[in-house]
Every structure is written in structure tokens, then in C-alpha cells.
Amino acid sequence: MSDKRGLLLREKKSAYEVLSEHEWENILDYSKGYMAFLDAGKTERECVCEIEKLAQSHGFSCWDRTRDKAVPGGAFYTQKHGKAIMLAVPGCRPISQGVRMVASHIDSPRIDLKPYPLYEKDGFAIFKTHYYGGIKKYQWMATPLSLHGAVYLKNGDLKEVSIGGNPGDPVLFISDVLPHLAKNQSDKTVGKAFSGENLNATAGARPDQDQGDDRIKLRVLDILHERYGMTENDFQSAELCLCPANKARDVGLDRSMIGAYGQDDRACAYAALKAILEVKNPEYTTACIMADKEEIGSEGITGMQSGFFDAVLRDMCSEQGVSLYECYENSFCLSGDVCNAFDPNFADVSDPQNNARAGFGPGVFKATGHRGKSGASDASGQTMSRLRQLLDDAGVPWQMGEMGKVDQGGGGTVAKYIANRGIEVVDIGVPVISMHSTFEVTAKIDCYFTYKAFLAQFMSGNS
Ligand code: MN
Ligand code: MN
């Protein structure tokens, strides 16, 4: 390449091309841990449990705001309602100089049970459902589904529910009509052919020995009662959902990819977790935020719009007599969320020049949103310059992207809710094929370098 070309043109190298020989082994090691995490955490609740376990085994302690001080040398975590969690490692510098954060989310699209879910009809016990997040409904039909969640009995006792994830467990399913009789269905557009109200999940077919009506339903309730001590009324204080039962799998004959449910956004949550677990004596205070409810707009007391995360950081600031806003003004956050990977099967929805590609490292999104960037926090040039420096100095291969062609659709992340707090923020995450499906696919190399990017963020300022 001539000097002029070297100077002026952007190099378009994939992450594989800059990878050193021995690093592929590290990528495989990393992927094993990530895939185990995906299998253990199908819901935000299960993720919080898993994250707590991993944090404890790395010396993080559960933070009690009335007792504990956030001092250098410590490392702590704190969670909200078992559905959102934050890890922090206090830095040597005063917190007025800001926090280095990564924020991701641990909820994923799924099928929730309705408040009065169970009924019996035509020889089956069936759960009525209400989907959560943006799904293509037909992808959830005729596929094994596992039952997850929590039942709070009236006395407040918690029963954790998980059926279908272990080999030998039974699964549930939502039926689809056979192609032989699908004339009416196939005459409709995809949007009209599958209704949310019809996503009913079959839970049983064998009558109880008791006499009377609804004996199939009764047997299902009997099983739940035996296992969790719950009755039909306890659905009122339950949070139960159906997730794809399948486990994470190596994809491709070369095993270069991972296929699994819930990689949006556990690909980034796990990367941030792995990174912060490695942080020791950082210059700046570091925080890893894993929020719930992103898929429905970051609402609720466990979502990114809630005061949970601010309350923790405010406590840390007040120990040093610093205002929260001063800390936020000097903070920098990577909003770790997955992006769409260019899909050669659906090339027409993307601008090939500006779509992130699998195998090219984490995708950086200056803006997300819809139409004319509506709903985006749209990071400034200053922020982008800062990020380029951070990633290039750390030797992390990365790329920029936009979600599809202009006016084709769009999406959002937690970034704007972080920006609303006055924190400098930009989106960066793993490119995903078939996002929001029951089988999302990522490149192992991108998952790994997303972790490296987050590690660079947490360790920035360290010599
Ligand atoms: Mn996401
Ligand atoms: Mn999503």
C-alpha cells in the first residue's frame, strides 16, 4: 500500500485478520463461560442469581448502604428486587472525577403468563400468555419452551420456578397449524396471521383421578402445588414466563459462532461482568450496571429509568461530600447493547456500507432510534473521539454501524436514559443475527472483543 493510501484510507480488516495465533484459545475459553451463563440465566432473575454467585466468588461483597463504605480496595454488588444488579469497584481518584461505567440489560423478549393463565379446553390444560418485548410471534410456535420465574406466596415466601432447562425435564409448547390445513393462515400477511391472543401454551393432557370438571387443569395445579406449594390464587403474585428451552450451541462447522436465546443483551452483560470481575485497584471508580425492563422501554423500579442506580452512586458520592451531578458530569458510560449484524439473507434491509458485520468486533452506534434518529441520544463527536482513542489504544478491533437502512425500522437502548442524567454515553455491543428470535447468533470473536472493550473502559487511566 502506498503511503498516501495508508494515510488517507480506512482499513477494513476483520477481527480475525488482526487476531494473534494464541488468542483463539482465549476466545474459546471465554465462549465456554459465556455459553454456561446463557444456559443458567434465561430470565433477568436467573441472571441476577448467577451474577451474584460469580461476584461473590471474585471477592465482591453484598453492599449494605447503612453499614458499608465504598473505599479503594473494596468491591461490591447490590441488587433490586432480584431483577437488576450493579457491581462497583471504588477507584483511587475522588469520585468527583467521575465513574467509568458500562450499562447493559439482562431482560430479553419472552412469553409471560397472564394473571389468570390456566384453563382447560378440548382435552388440554393451557396457559394464556402475554408476550414481553418485540417478538415475531411465529418463531415461538412449535418449539420447546421452558417455564421460569418466581411465585411469591401470599405470606411472602418466594418459590423460584424453573422447569424445562435440564435434560429429562418436561417442556411446554405453543402449537402451530399443520401446513396441510394452513390455507387460511397462509392467505394472510405475517403481521395478521399470528395473533398475540392465540399464543396459548399447552401444559398438560392427563386428567386427575378426582371427580368433576377441569380434571386436566387440576392435575397441572396439583403438580405445581406439590413442587412449589402454590395454588391457582398464587398466580396473582407470580411472575412466570416461557423461554426457549434449548441450550446454547456452537454454530458453524468451524464452531466460530454461538447460537442461543437471550444474547440480546446477555452478550454485553456477560462481557461487562467478566471485565469488572478482573478490575483491581482502578484509577477511577468503575461501575457495571445490569438493568431490567429494557425490552419494554426501561420502565419500572428495576429499569434504567428508575432511581435505583442513582441511589447507589449518590451514597458513594455523599461519602466524599460530592454532588451526584458533579460525579455524573465527569463520568463516561458505555451503553453495552447488541446491534444487528449484516445478514446476507436479508441484505436489502441494510446499507452494506454502514451496517455492523459479524466478525469485525463490537459495533459502535453513534445513534440508534427511528426515522430521523427519533429517540436516539446521538453521541457527540467529542464522545466518539474519546471512544476511538480508548479502543484503539487497547488494540480492540471495532466497527461503526447503523441499524438497517434509513426508514426501514429501528431500535433503542438504555443510552438515552443515561444521557438524561448528564453522563457522556455511547452505544457499543456485539452484532447479532436473528435478534429477538429464539435462536440469536453471534460470532465468538465479537463477544470476546466486546469484553476487551469493556475491560479497557474500566481500566482507563491505569498505567
Ligand atoms: Mn438490547
Ligand atoms: Mn432487544
Image: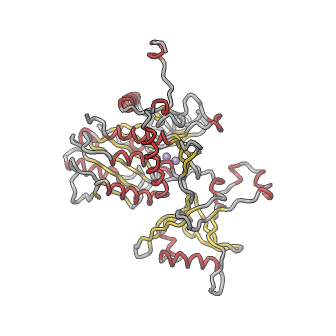
User: Which residue is found at the position 56% from the left and 77% from the top?
Assistant: 221
Give me the residue at 44% from left, 51% from top: 33
Seen in the image, is 368 located left or right of residue 94?
Answer: right
Q: Residue at x 56, y 28 (%)?
A: 353
Left or right: 362 as drawn, with respect to 403: left
Residue 431 seen? yes
Against 367, is 77 above or below? below
User: What residue is rendered at 66% in x and 74% in y?
Assistant: 205
Quarter in which the C terminus is drawn: top left
Q: Quadrant of residue 128?
A: bottom right
Residue 281, horizontal then vertical, whole percent: 24, 44
Residue 147 locus on image (x, y percent) = 54, 65
- Most foreground residue, 114 or 253: 253
Could you tell whether 176 is left or right of 282 in the image?
Answer: right
Percent coordinates x, y for residue 226 in the rendering: 51, 78
Question: Against 185, is 366 above or below?
Answer: above
